[in-house]
C-alpha cells in the first residue's frame, strides 16, 4: 500500500468510527426535545423516567462522539499538511465557526439540561434541550460547508499557489451544501428515530413498561417514516446535482464505462471488471438512469471513457477515474438500506393504525436489529461521496496524492493507524457495553430526584 493509501485509510477509519456517533447525537437531541415538550405540558412520573432513560443513552453517545471527533482536525496538520497549506484559509473558516459557536452552544445547553432538572422551570428546561438540538444541527451545517468546498470549490482565488477565501457568503450559498446538508440532516433524524424505535421495541416485545415506551415508539415511528421518504427524495436531487458538478462520480457510481444510449437503463446489480472496463451479469431497469439524471425518459449520460478524455484536456495528463467497484456498490447498499427503512416504517404505521402493533412481536424484535440500518446507510453514503471524488481531495484544484505530509513516513502512519483503530475499537465496545447495560436495566436504572417538576417559585 502506498503512503497516500495509508493516509486515506487512516482518515477513513477514524472518520467512520466518529460518524457512528454524530448522526445519532443529532437525531436523539431532536426527539428528546419533543418528548420533554410533551412532558412539560402533561407531567407524569413515567414520562420523566423515560426522559431520564433516553437522556442517559444520549449522554453516553455524546461523550464518545466528542472524544472520537477531537482527532479529526488534528489529522489535517499531521497527515495532510500540504492540503492544510493549500486550502487552510478557506477550509478553516467554517470549522472555526463550528467549534466556537455551534459546538459551544450545544455543549453549554446540554450542561444546563443535565444539571437543570428541578432547578429550572419546566419550560426553560425543555428549551435547553431544544437549543442543544439546534446546536447539533448548526454544527453539522458548518462541517458540511467545509466538506462541500472539497466537492465543489467556490468563493476562493489562487494566490501564489494557495487558495484564499474571497467570499464567505459563497461558501454558505454553495449549491453542493444545499443539496448535501438536508440529506445528511434527515439521515441523522432517521438514525435517532430508528434508535428510539429499536430500544422501545425491545421493551414492547417483552411487555415491559408498555405504557411508557409506546409514546416514544410512536414518535420515532412518525419521524422515521417521514425522514425515510424524504431522504430518498433529496438523495435524488443530490444525484442530479452531481450530473453537473461531478459527472465522473455519477458515472463511476453506475459503472458506466461508455456514454449511454438516449434511453439509459439503471443497473441494479452487475459484476464489474475494471481492468477490462466492462460489466457482466447485468440486471438493469430500462430508462431509469435517464429519469434519475434528467427527470425524463430520454437523455444520454456521459460515460467514464468520455469524461476521462475530457478531464485530460482540462486538467492535464493523469488518471481521473475513481475506484469504480467501491463507488458502485456503496451507492447500491445505501439505496438498499434506505428502501428497507421505508418498508419497515410503513409497515409499522399500518400495524399501529390497525391497532395490532403490540401483537406484531416479530416486527418489534426486527426493529431492535434495524437500529443499524440508518447507520449503515450513512456510512455507505459517505464512502460513495468521498471515494467517488478521487483522485481529487478538492475537486479540480488539488489531487489527493499532492495533499499528504511527505515528512510522515509509512511506519508512522501504520503505527498511528493501528493505535487509533484499537483505541477507537475499545471506545466503541465500551459505549456498546454501557448502552446495553442501561437498556437492560430499563426505567429502574436510576430513580429521578423528583417524579415531577416542582412549581416555579
Image (cartoon, helix red, strand yellow):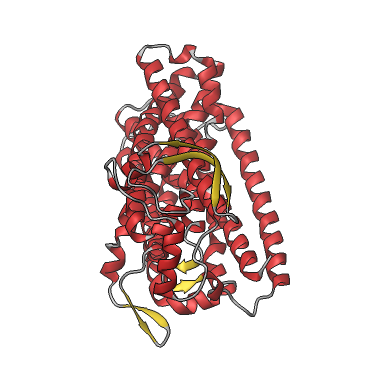
**Residue at 57% in and 74% down:** 404
* Residue 295 is at least partly visible in this image: yes
Residue 101 at x, y percent in the picture: 37, 62
Where 286 falls versus 12 (above or below)? Answer: above
Residue 199 at x, y percent in the picture: 52, 29
Q: Count how many numbered circles sit on residues in the image.
A: 0
Q: Is residue 133 left or right of residue 55?
A: left
* Residue 208 is at least partly visible in this image: no
Residue 220 falls in image quadrant? top left
Q: Is residue 281 left or right of residue 214?
A: right
Residue 430 falls in image quadrant? top right
**Residue at 59% in and 71% down:** 79
Which residue lies most toward the front here? 261
Q: Nearer the viewer, residue 248 or 141?
A: 248
Q: From the image, which quarter does the N terminus lie in?
A: bottom right
Residue 356 at x, y percent in the picture: 42, 11
Q: From the image, which quarter does the C terminus lie in?
A: top left
Q: Is residue 298 left or right of residue 213?
A: left
Where 8 falls versus 21 (above or below)? Answer: below
Where 311 falls versus 444 (above or below)? Answer: below
Q: Is residue 43 left or right of residue 19?
A: left
**Residue at 45% in and 76% down:** 316
Where 92 falls versus 457 (above or below)? Answer: below
Q: Nearer the viewer, residue 183 or 127?
A: 183
Residue 300 at x, y percent in the picture: 33, 50
Amino acid at each position: 500500500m502506498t503512503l497516500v493509501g495509508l493516509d486515506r485509510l487512516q482518515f477513513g477509519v477514524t472518520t467512520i468510527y466518529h460518524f457512528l456517533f454524530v448522526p445519532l447525537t443529532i437525531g436523539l437531541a431532536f426527539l428528546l426535545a419533543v418528548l420533554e415538550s410533551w412532558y412539560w405540558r402533561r407531567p407524569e412520573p413515567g414520562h420523566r423516567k423515560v426522559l431520564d432513560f433516553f437522556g442517559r443513552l444520549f449522554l453516553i453517545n455524546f461523550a464518545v462522539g466528542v472524544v472520537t471527533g477531537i482527532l479529526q482536525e488534528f489529522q489535517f496538520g499531521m497527515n495532510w499538511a500540504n492540503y492544510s497549506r493549500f486550502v487552510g484559509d478557506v477550509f478553516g473558516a467554517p470549522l472555526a465557526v463550528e467549534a466556537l459557536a455551534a459546538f459551544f452552544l450545544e455543549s453549554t445547553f446540554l450542561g444546563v439540561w443535565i444539571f437543570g432538572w428541578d432547578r429550572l422551570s419546566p419550560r426553560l428546561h425543555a428549551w435547553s434541550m431544544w437549543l442543544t438540538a439546534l446546536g447539533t444541527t448548526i454544527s453539522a451545517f458548518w462541517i458540511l460547508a467545509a466538506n462541500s468546498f472539497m466537492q465543489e470549490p467556490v468563493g476562493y482565488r489562487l494566490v501564489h499557489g494557495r487558495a484564499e477565501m474571497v467570499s464567505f457568503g459563497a461558501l454558505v450559498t454553495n449549491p453542493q451544501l444545499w443539496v448535501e446538508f438536508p440529506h445528511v440532516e434527515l439521515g441523522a433524524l432517521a438514525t435517532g428515530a430508528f434508535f428510539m424505535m429499536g430500544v422501545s421495541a425491545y421493551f414492547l416485545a417483552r411487555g415491559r413498561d408498555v405504557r411508557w415506551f409506546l409514546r416514544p415508539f410512536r414518535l420515532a415511528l412518525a419521524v422515521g417514516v417521514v425522514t425515510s421518504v424524504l431522504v430518498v427524495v433529496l438523495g435524488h436531487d443530490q444525484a442530479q446535482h452531481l450530473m453537473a458538478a461531478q459527472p465522473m462520480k455519477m458515472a463511476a457510481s453506475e459503472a458506466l464505462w461508455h456514454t449511454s444510449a438516449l434511453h439509459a437503463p439503471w443497473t441494479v446489480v452487475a459484476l464489474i471488471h475494471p481492468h477490462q472496463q466492462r460489466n457482466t451479469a447485468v440486471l438493469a431497469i430500462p430508462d431509469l438512469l435517464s429519469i434519475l439524471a434528467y427527470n425524463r425518459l430520454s437523455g444520454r449520460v456521459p460515460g467514464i471513457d468520455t469524461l476521462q478524455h475530457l478531464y485530460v484536456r482540462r486538467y492535464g495528463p493523469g488518471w481521473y477515474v475513481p475506484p469504480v467497484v467501491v463507488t458502485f456498490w456503496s451507492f447500491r447498499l445505501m439505496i438498499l438500506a434506505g428502501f428497507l427503512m421505508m418498508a419497515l416504517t410503513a409497515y409499522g404505521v399500518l400495524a399501529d393504525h390497525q391497532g395490532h402493533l403490540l401483537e406484531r412481536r416479530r416486527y418489534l424484535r426486527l426493529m431492535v436489529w434495524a437500529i443499524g440500518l440508518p447507520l449503515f446507510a450513512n456510512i455507505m453514503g459517505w464512502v460513495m461521496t468521498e471515494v467517488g471524488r478521487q483522485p481529487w481531495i478538492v475537486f479540480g484544484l488539488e489531487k489527493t496524492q499532492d495533499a499528504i505530509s511527505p515528512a510522515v513516513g509509512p511506519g508512522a502512519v501504520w503505527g498511528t493507524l493501528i493505535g487509533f483503530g484499537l483505541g477507537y475499537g475499545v471506545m466503541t465496545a465500551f459505549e456498546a457495553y454501557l448502552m446495553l447495560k442501561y437498556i437492560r436495566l430499563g426505567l429502574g436504572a436510576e430513580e429521578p430526584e423528583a417524579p415531577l417538576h416542582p412549581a416555579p417559585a
